[in-house]
Amino acid sequence: MFVKLKYLFCAVFLLFSTSKLNAQQNFTLTGVLFEKGTTLRIALAEVKNKRTGFSAGSNDIGLFTIKASIGDTLLVTKRNFSDLQVVVKDTKDLVLYLNKGTMLNEVVVTGQTKKQALNEIKKDFRNKGSFYGGKPPLALLNPFGGSPLTFLYELFGKTPRKARRFNTMYQNEMQDSHVDQYYNKTLINQQTGLSGKELEDFLVNYRPTYDQAKNWNVYDGIKWINDSYKKYSDTAGKAKSN
């Protein structure tokens, strides 16, 4: 009887110890975000646990809560601020400070520079006499006030034909540049940790279309990357199990 009670006590002790250990490993972490060098709190920042892939946002007074374990790495991102990575060392509340940054602004400037260069080419076609980019309006066929010769030139002329092909390319380039602002290697690496061939494959396989991204802001792009990464991870996990 004593031996049975001894084994029962050991089993209860092990169960309690395991539960306590799990509780210590996974806990709710609370933190607050400030702009560095000020007392201004940062709202609407994203805090991502890179191990679990789960994210949380800071509220109007800069507070956030997220599930974490000791040793996890948190990635904090906010538009116009430099990204911050911090390792969870204990269960104490975090006070974090973000520096002002310009990475996203630089991405926008790059896209704007490309647009300016392409607009110079469009201007060159107009200087060469193609005012309608190879797509003349039907109003030009009106013999009273129109210009049938201009219509025919825009439709069949060599320069307008080149302008027509260029305008198709121009539209595609502008749409690609818009998507690139919110979906690029830098952002994907920051959100997922992918690199090398895995990053290249993810970049191609989960790229959104222009219609999907045309009304996005930076947070929509981050959400798309995180949602896509979950699909990517689930697919990779199933492939390994098979």
Image: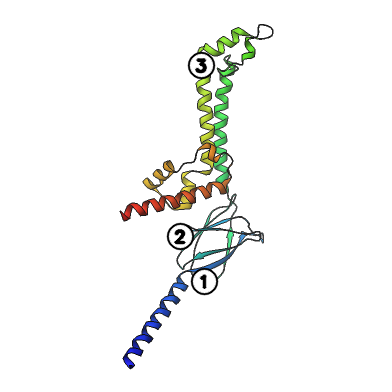
Instruction: Compare marks 3 and 2 and give the one earlier in the sequence.
Output: 2
- Is 128 situated left or right of 60 in this image? left
**Pointer 2 or 1: first along the chain:** 2
Residue 163 % position (x, y): 53, 19
Between residue 114 and residue 184, name the one nearer to us.
Answer: 184
Q: Which residue is mark 2?
A: 52
The quarter of the image holding the N terminus is: bottom left
The residue tagged 3 is: 161
The first of marks 1 and 3 along the sequence is: 1
Residue ID at (62%, 14%): 138
Residue 89 % position (x, y): 48, 69
C-alpha gap between disc 3 and disc 2: 54 Å
Q: Are marks 3 and 2 in contact (CB under 8 Å)?
A: no
User: As shown in the figure, which amino acid type bears the numbered disc 2?
Assistant: Thr
Residue 118, position as x, y percentages in the image: 54, 27
Q: Is residue 175 above or below residue 58?
A: above
Q: How many marks?
A: 3
User: 212 or 127: nearer the eye?
Assistant: 212
Task: Give the class, few, some or many, for how many residues have Cα within 10 Å of label 1's Cα (few <14, many ≥20).
Answer: some
In the image, what residue occupies the spot 56% across and 31% down?
A: 115
Q: Distance from label 2 to label 1 (Cα)?
A: 17 Å
Above or below residue 90? Residue 104 is: above
Residue wearing tag 1:
91
Q: Which amino acid type is shown beneath numbered disc 3?
A: Arg
